[in-house]
Image (tube, coloured by chain):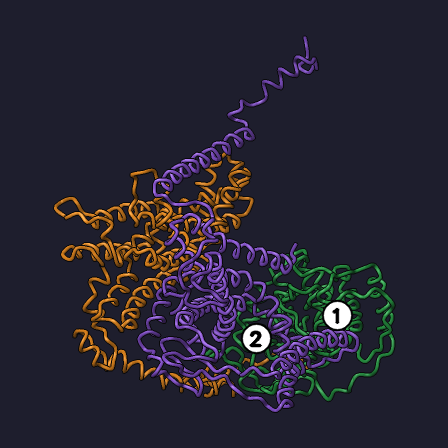
Amino acid sequence: MQSMFSGSAEDTTAFDRRQAPPFWRDPAKRAIVFQVVALGLVFMLSYWIFTNTQANLRKQAIATGFGFFSKEAGFEIGESLISYSAADTYARALFVGFLNTMKVACTGVILTIILGVFVGISRLSKNWLLARLAAGYTELLQNIPVLLQLFFWYGLFHTSLPGPRQSFNPLPGVFFNNRGFYFPLPENHPAYREMAIALLAACCAAYVLRRWARARQDKTGKIFPVVPVSLGAVIGLPFILWLASGMPAGLNIPHLVGFNYEGGFSFSPEFGALLLGLVLYTSAFVAEIVRAGIQAVSKGQTEAAMSIGLKPGLVLSLVILPQALRVIIPPLTSQMLNLTKNSSLAVAIGYPDFVAVANTTINQTGQAIEGVAMIMVVYLFISLVTSALMNWYNKRRALVER
Amino acid sequence: MEQTSISLHTIEEVKPPVTSIGVIGWARKNLFSNILNSLLTILIAYGLFRSVPTFIKWAFVNAVWWSDGQACNQASGACWSIVTKNLRFILFGFYPYEQQWRPVFAIVLLAAFVFFSSFRRNWNKYLLVAWIVGLTLIGLIMHGGFLGLPSVETEQWSGISLTLLLSIFGLSAAYPFGVILALGRRSRLPAIKTLCVVYIELIRGVPLISMLFMASVMFPLFLPEGVTINKILRAQVAIIMFTAAYIAEVVRGGLQAIPRGQYEAAETLGLNYYLKMRLIILPQALKTVIPPTVSILISAFKDTSLVVIIGLFDLLRTTHVTLSNPEWMGFSTEAYLFTASIYFVGCFVMSNFSRRLERELKT
Amino acid sequence: MFRNVKLQPPPRERIKDLRGRRLINSTLREAGENNKMTYQATKTPDKVSTGPIIRIVSMHKWFGEFHVLKDINLSVDKGERIVICGPSGSGKSTLIRCINRLEEHQRGKIIVDDIELTNDIKNIEKIRVEVGMVFQHFNLFPHLTILENLTLGPIWVRKLPRSEAEDIAMYFLEKVHIAEQAAKFPGQLSGGQQQRVAIARSLCMKPKVMLFDEPTSALDPEMVKEVLDVMMQLAHEGMTMLVVSHEMGFAKSVAHRVLFMDSGQILEENTPGEFFSNPRHDRSKLFLSQILH
């Protein structure tokens, strides 16, 4: 009687062939088939869309490609950070739009963080009035669509701001009218350049001071009041220079020339409405994030820190904030991205940001696909860069656990 | 060091110090606990004292409620007539005047459904069926064309009807799509995973307005000659695509929170992928992420206002259009305040529900 | 106990600062051993205290209208060890939390080391430095290493140089038998290990009194012993301890007095032997019958 395990070559291969499942039950093969089918479907859909698009574009005699970049734009842009006229190319016009978007986004991010942190902390204040006001602020502004808020502020500016000749003049040199908001700017004086250098130097000195104070504390245990001293240097040094150069106080005051104001520092009602609406809306979300972050640090941490004898200021900076920031930074970054994406709504109130300029370009050249693709690529680029930075920061700061 | 035990005399009722309880105690603790707080309270109280009466005077005392544009121009207070005189246009847009009871009925029905669903004890299989039936019913009532109800094409649905249509239908269709994307993203098959990741990251990185532009100008180019899809449907598709990506991320979070043991137990029972997901994993995951899903619904509700930019007549656009009437020019504040309050009530109710739900699910 | 001791830190690789990479090499263990020797050196006599180290006189506390502590009178001498037990909600935790001002009392006096606890911040801070506390849920700082957890107080409150603070920290880590974990983070340790670190953290401030708020209640049973061993070691070295706990074995072996509290009052106070064998109050009898089954 031959044993089952006789080991002859023919037997084993027959054995193997019997054991291997048919390919439709083999998980690995099924996976490949499934993926091929899925990719095939996607490919077929893309192909169908592609051929339709080609046919339609040909029928409507619309150009393809990005050749329009070097063509003359032929439209004016309301406000621009760099010089621009209707004779410049579309490429330059789009760049102007991009710079305007960056202007709104950067200013908006800074103001939102300041306002949001302030409101978030107020929400946790022991003062009942302040806490309730902050809660009302976040509830109200979170639940109204941002576009509606933009329309509201823009409408308010248009209905209540007078013409240039009857401008509001709340403070000397400050004028509000329906062409814009005008503020006096210090006149160009050589002392200001020196003051700027002094400011920079003071900041560097503050950084060096901090490192020195830390080393000193490590060695001797004595704590050096870094913050007051640095603050004093950063404010005091430029101030001394200002005094020394004769206290120049010349102001470039906006003055009426014909129908408009000139001089000083100004921004348009469109920019004002966009900034105000975006900052108020996003700061409500940031306030909630800050509040949640601070509350995420358990009360026991504060108690433990206090029972070692740490003063409240040190409890905050050494124990609470490091832990709270870990919880706050990721959602904060996504809110900042939301702000940048929401700035695209500028097209609805007439501020010439990137989307608005791209929209005009689409309307004039008829090249919708390139236009929309451009918009998506630009915002995608901003999003991906920010997400990558945030992921890198998160990995560095993650709490180490088992 | 005494060795005695404390005697058993009862401590007579001792009241806490007067300054630490009652109204005075509350005020001391919450408003005037230290110098900074007291200063703050005084400052805020002063600010309120200056601003609130002025606002009330403008909004209510000196306001004009029912007259026409001219009287408004002469009044010093708010002109609420812009709302009252144009109410039906703001709310219902181009829906035929005599048939406007139908959207009202539809909204009441929807509100009743939502109210009923907000109590967790009513959640079961039948609720889902009831919702599907209810939504179809609402759709039929709005559209008409049977039983003597004149037919009203979807192009004419405007105002609140369009807002609700876009958000509710958008979320309902986006939800299964988003769940599939989330499952695909967690899949081990590289092609599927890549497709899903690319889709999700692409959509989440671009503003909704670019999707709406894509819908309004690019979609017509994608379709073969002679086939047209009305603008509302195109916008709806864009909103669905957009919302699905966000739902996918939220559901992915829920799937990650399910312990590995659940997957393993399901596999040990011999369930295949479909049954495993349907019976074990998804019910748990989806329940966990209901609060973030509701917040996506709130965002979708607010984001429908963006269709203003591509020319559809939702609630915001109808408001915007009343202002271009020369009779009502210049009263944008009142009109927008009214519309804002509608959005606010809707979103506030939903977010309160979500918070209550989160509390219930946590305990 | 270990006041005013001049340390000669042995030459060794310095642990990098809070922001740099952490390096621990084997010389740390040597450091611990060296420190043990150095610490046993000169011991200046303590200030002669003029009475009990903790005195609570007619103390009342309310949470709003709820009278949570009623007419507490307690006197604790230096070196005394007191265990406070009672049903939950009796106010035991609130009582010891009042001693380091984590809770405020509304009436009566609390005097710690001849400093009265009032709203005066300076007094509160002085008292908190002398009173150490160990919590039920450890409350270690998760974003700092074990070593940094321990050196935080000495560096920022006692204003010691970093090397001295680290030596003290390593000494106490050795004492609680956890020195090899100095470079890890709290999240990487077990519950029993974390609680021992928490005890070491309080000891680094060299307090005169140690308060324990149910230190073993949140631990798995197999880890309770390691923490109790550390506490007993502390007791044998003469530390004044107030312990809120249900560990009756611990009370029997090291406590000088057992306090039984219920509904905010101290109902019974006795030596452990007397308390466990002859409880006098009805409620103490009931409580003991429920625990000792």
Eyeballing the image, is C178 above or below A213? above
Name chain B's colour. Answer: orange
Q: Percent position (x, y) of residue A93?
A: 46, 60
The residue located at (71%, 65%) in the rendering is: C19
Is C185 positioned to the left or the right of B15 in the image? right
**Tag 1: residue type?**
Leu
The residue located at (87%, 70%) in the rendering is: C37
- Which quadrant would residue A342 be assigned to in this image? bottom left
Residue A187 in view of the camera? yes
Quadrant the N terminus of chain C occupies? bottom right
**Tag 2: residue type?**
Thr
Q: Percent position (x, y) of residue C183?
A: 74, 61
Chain identifier, colour purple = A
Dot 1 alpha-carbon crowd within 10 angstroms: few under 14, some 14 to 19, many 20 or more = some
Give the labeled residue for mark 1. Answer: C234
The residue located at (78%, 86%) in the rendering is: C47
- In the displayed orientation, state which residue is furthest to the top: A1
